[in-house]
Image (tube, rainbow, N blue to C red):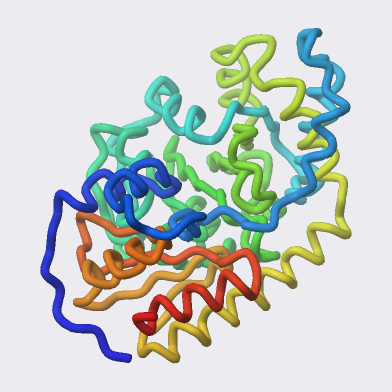
Amino acid sequence: MAFGMPQVESQAVSALTIHGGRIDAAAARYPDAPRPWLDLSTGINPNGYDSAALMTADAYALPSPSRLVALEEAAAAAFGMTCGAIAALPGTEIGLRLLATMDLPRPARVVAPSYGSHAAALPDATSVACDALADADWRSALLANPNNPDGRLVAPETLLALARSRAGDAWLVIDEAFADCVAGTSVLPLLHADDRVLVFRSFGKFYGLAGVRLGFVCGPEAIVARYRERLGSWPVSSAAIELGIAAYRDIAWQDATRRDLVTAASALDAVLRRHRLVPQGDCPLFRLIATPAAPTLFKRLAAAGILTRPFDYAPDWLRIGLPDDADALARLDRALGGG
């Protein structure tokens, strides 16, 4: 089905263009939408890891230092790290915000489009397109790989070659929030001890437990130690520690989930194409579509109780996350068809 040209009502979606997951704001703007809402506005795995490990966490005691070490070791093994240091964070958002305190050399560049928090992390940085980064003037650069919202994926060998081509004290910072989803996309297994590369990893996206607020910073010991110093003795909760240990040690779940995500993304692609929408991106947790009808399509889906992710800086874009099962996919299919 083809969609008509949009009648843009910017105020109707302005609160929903900051980030995904704002079901409360969507429900307030569309009070007649059917319940329950289907949230496709995030890039979070809708079939995440079993949270039963929460039951093993002692909420009455301070987090155990030895269990924190066990968490970081389990994560480093899952990431394929062979050198460097790792520190747990209460979510990668905090780690990115602390970049401004790390005295990275200037000038700085932020690859765009990407996360809005990247610009906030290096507020004096100028933006640059990914394919122009190699020729740009920078001594610190920040990008996401795989990228959000377009799912662009750059080979890790390409990124390492770029980092190593910069003389002196230049730093490349890579946000690998979605790297767990596609094997072979991380630079961490390829790093040398002297590489000036800092990597952030997220727990909530692939494992589907975003509310746990767990992430990691990985890189040379000197800069990771500065993160530890700023975060103090108990950077993450006991619940986050126990969930993380269980999930990062569960190789069978990780392998099966990567396969399942590819299958689910292919099914979503088929539905989108059936409605003459071209899916973009190499990250299986979401797809980006570009169409002049995006604002109208957003409103149609919201009226059907389905939240997607619009963008104020790109009104022709809409990001659509994975439905959690066949029934949810069929509901999206019907809504796209106007039913």
Q: In which quarter of the image is the N terminus?
A: bottom left
Tell me if 61 is positioned left or right of 149 in this view: right
Q: Which image quarter: residue 179?
A: bottom right
- In the image shown, does 279 or 73 lie closer to the viewer? 279
Q: Work out whether residue 218 can be spotted.
A: yes
In the depicted structure, whether residue 3 falls above or below residue 181: below
Q: Which image quarter: residue 252?
A: bottom right
In the depicted structure, whether residue 126 falls above or below residue 130: above
Tell me if 89 is positioned left or right of 143 in this view: right
Q: Where is residue 32 in the image (x, y as percent from the top left)?
A: 33, 56
Q: Position of residue 334 (x, y in %)?
A: 45, 80
- In the image shown, does 97 or 273 lie closer to the viewer? 273
In the depicted structure, whether residue 121 falls above or below residue 202: above
Q: Work out whether residue 139 can be spotted.
A: no
Q: Residue at x 44, y 66 (%)?
A: 320
Tell me if 55 is positioned left or right of 299 in this view: right
Q: Which residue is drawn at 25% across and 78% down?
A: 291
Q: Quadrant of the C terminus?
A: bottom left
Q: Which residue is drawn at 56% across and 41% down?
A: 200
Q: Where is residue 315 in the image (x, y as percent from the top left)?
A: 20, 64
User: In the rendered picture of this protein, how many numbered marks are placed on residues?
Assistant: 0
Q: Residue at x 39, y 61 (%)?
A: 308
In the depicted structure, whether residue 191 falls above or below residue 307: above
Q: Where is residue 55 in the image (x, y as percent from the top left)?
A: 85, 29
